[in-house]
Amino acid sequence: MPGGRLTQQERQQIGLGLADGLPYAEIARRLDRPTSTITREVMRNGGPTAYRAELAHRATERRAQRRRRSAPRGAKAPLQAYGRDPEAVREYQEAFTTVFMASGAPKMMSRVLACLYTTDEGSLTAAELVERLEVSPASVSKAIAFLEEQGLVRRERDERRRERYVVDDDVWYQSMMASVGSTAQVAETARQGVGVFGPGTPAAVRLENIARFLDFVTESLARAAEQARDILYVKPETSPGRTAETPSGRTAETPPGGAATPGSDG
């Protein structure tokens, strides 16, 4: 039943599909489900190598019970800004978390990052993260330390001297440049191996090719990030049909009810 919650039988089929080495898209096709549903289900329950249908089903039931306990009978879901649907927001945050996990980030770090990115303020205190994610302060502290190391969040003090964790417009650029630096270091180390193994030998040729490839990729990525950096600061017009101007002086047509498309030439 597309759109409904996964059943225990469906989870068993997912487990069998993973055991057979099937891609998420094929498992989704067989269950008549969106691929994103299967990806989210697997990543939030241990990943493709550790997924167990029975454990995943019990974990889902426990999460549902916790939500029921946290929302007393007759109580309405917390109000969301701008009239947002609380359930839609929760589902989106889970999907965003899954994307970060699929890219290699640990689960708790992914949850913290998704939570920060989906706030209008772009920042939260440790206490606010603990409350929203229903986790321990230690878990939040460990996640923030990891994200800071990756250049994905930064700390600042607010007017009440509380420490806040921030994902502002420039954080994504800084993180990408940090990644460029790390990859450039790999290229330099690979190139050093040419002298160790001897120019022209199979190992040296392989290492030299790796270095050349990474040189090209890092230079291209750094150049693209610099050229596109202004996009992070585009402020879309709110009036339908208005033309928004990017920091580079170009314009982007704002469709009725929508936001401007950064970088569009009209």
Image (tube, rainbow, N blue to C red):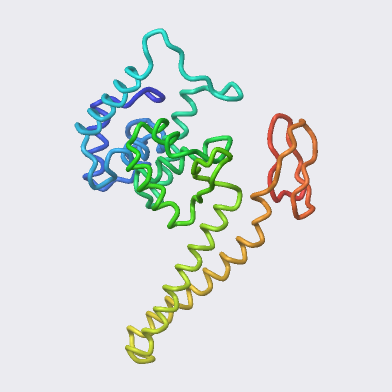
Q: At 24% from the left edge and 47% from the top edge, which residue is drawn?
A: 49
The image quarter containing residue 254 is top right
Judge left or right: residue 129 versus residue 198.
right
Q: Say if 2 sits above or below 24 in the image.
A: above
Q: Say if 201 sits above or below 212 in the image.
A: below
Judge left or right: residue 44 versus residue 165.
left
Foreground: 102 or 16?
102
Residue 138, image x and y in percent? 32, 43
Q: Say if 103 sits above or below 86 in the image.
A: below
Q: Say if 190 sits above or below 256 in the image.
A: below
Residue 100, image x and y in percent? 42, 46
Label tally: 0
* Residue at the extreme top: 74
Foreground: 154 or 46?
154
Q: At 37% from the left edge and 30% from the top edge, which residue is drawn?
A: 32
Foreground: 203 or 146?
146
Judge left or right: residue 62 versus residue 241.
left
Q: Quadrant of the N terminus?
A: top left
Residue 129, image x and y in percent? 43, 36
Q: At 35% from the left edge and 21% from the top edge, which residue is drawn?
A: 67
Residue 33, image x and y in percent? 38, 31
